[in-house]
């Protein structure tokens, strides 16, 4: 695996691959890689000739009181995992390489409306940071395909919308959520879960699945389902950020006759904010 810290040298290497007719796959990450990230690399490998993974803990998508400074940076271990997975290129720039004019002066990319709800409501500016850095990374790598995890369901929807709206010629591919045995979705932030909380954190997933089963069985009192799920999560000892039942494509509150529904939730543990979602397609 070749490792690049600079845009120019990565571009030169990828230009040669493109000239040789190679299809380029891209997996953008913030590092601290786990099995779910490696699954994204494998998906990219299936569809492409060469795969680029980026590791950049993007300061622009973290709020002032968020965990940018304590976000785990594990480049040596990440690099070994990517090498073992057969990734071809690793791009790990520093802040100056990505934001040479400083973050305040950085041109922004904004996807309106669908970024104001769910995670966007509790993390103002977060998605603006994501869409801005992803656009930059897309322009640097210029991949044919880019793979994003479904665990960040809203992020995936926002990026799909951005690519559509800005006519970006990149196919966006979704990677399934990878879960621990008890249902906890794999996340780089799971390392912040305390030993005491660990047996209880899968309640978020259990409650979202409970809503899904109730909907499959015909219940449509969405507000009642949401409130009951919030109670379950609070009883397990966690502060709820949100639980919502949404139209899978628009992320608006689901209508009773919607057939593609995603149930999304976020909760706070002592040291982390965890998110999860489950989708259902009704016949
Ligand atoms: O999902 C992530 O890890 C980040 O939001 C991303 C897409 C790499 C942008 O920084």
Image (cartoon, rainbow, N blue to C red):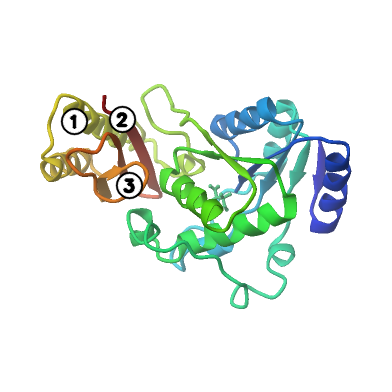
- Classify mark 1: helix, strand or loop: helix
Mark 1 — residue? 215
Left or right, residue 149 beside residue 264: right
- For the residues marked 3 and 1, what is the alpha-carbon distance in whole angstroms? 20 Å
Confirm or reject: label 3 Cβ below 8 Å from ligand 1. no
Quarter of the image with the N terminus in it: top right
> Residue 118 location, x and y as percent?
33, 53
The residue mark sitting in front, 3 or 1, is 1
Mark 1 vs 2, N-terminal side: 1
> Residue 168 location, x and y as percent?
62, 53
Mark 3 vs 2, N-terminal side: 3
**Quarter-of-image position of residue 137:** bottom right
Left or right, residue 69 beside residue 261: right
Would you say the residues marked 1 and 2 are in contact, meaning their CB atoms lie under 8 Å apart?
A: yes
The residue that appears at 58% across and 35% down in the rendered structure is 37
**44 in relation to 271, above or below:** above
**74 in relation to 195, above or below:** below
Mark 3 — residue? 266
Would you call the spot at circle 3 few (<14 residues within 10 Å), some (14-19), or many (20 or more)? Answer: many
Mark 2 — residue? 280
- Classify mark 3: helix, strand or loop: strand
> Residue 57 location, x and y as percent?
60, 54
Mark 3 vs 1, N-terminal side: 1
């Amino acid at each position: 695996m070749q490792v690049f810290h600079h845009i120019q040298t990565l571009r030169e290497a990828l230009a040669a691959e493109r000239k040789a007719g190679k299809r380029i796959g891209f997996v953008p990450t913030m590092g601290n890689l786990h099995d779910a990230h490696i699954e994204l690399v494998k998906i990219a490998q299936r569809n492409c000739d060469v795969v680029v993974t980026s590791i950049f803990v993007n300061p622009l998508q973290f709020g002032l009181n968020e965990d940018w400074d304590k976000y785990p940076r594990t480049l040596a271990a990440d690099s070994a995992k990517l090498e073992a997975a057969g990734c071809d290129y690793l791009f790990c720039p520093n802040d100056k390489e990505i934001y040479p004019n400083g973050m305040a002066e950085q041109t922004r990319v904004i996807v309106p409306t669908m970024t104001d709800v769910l995670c966007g409501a509790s993390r103002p500016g977060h998605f603006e940071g994501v869409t801005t850095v992803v656009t930059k990374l897309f322009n640097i790598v210029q991949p044919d395909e880019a793979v994003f995890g479904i665990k960040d369901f809203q992020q995936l929807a926002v990026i799909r919308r951005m690519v559509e709206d800005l006519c970006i010629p990149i196919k966006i591919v979704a990677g399934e959520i990878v879960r621990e045995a008890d249902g906890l979705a794999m996340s780089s932030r799971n390392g912040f879960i305390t030993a005491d909380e660990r047996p209880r954190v899968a309640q978020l997933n259990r409650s979202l699945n409970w809503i899904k089963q109730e909907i499959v069985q015909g219940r449509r009192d969405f507000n009642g389902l949401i409130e009951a799920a919030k109670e379950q999560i609070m009883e397990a000892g966690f502060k709820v950020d949100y639980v919502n039942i949404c139209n899978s494509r628009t992320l608006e509150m689901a209508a009773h006759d919607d057939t593609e529904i995603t149930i999304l939730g976020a909760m706070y543990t002592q040291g982390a904010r965890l998110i999860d979602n489950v989708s259902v397609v009704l016949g």
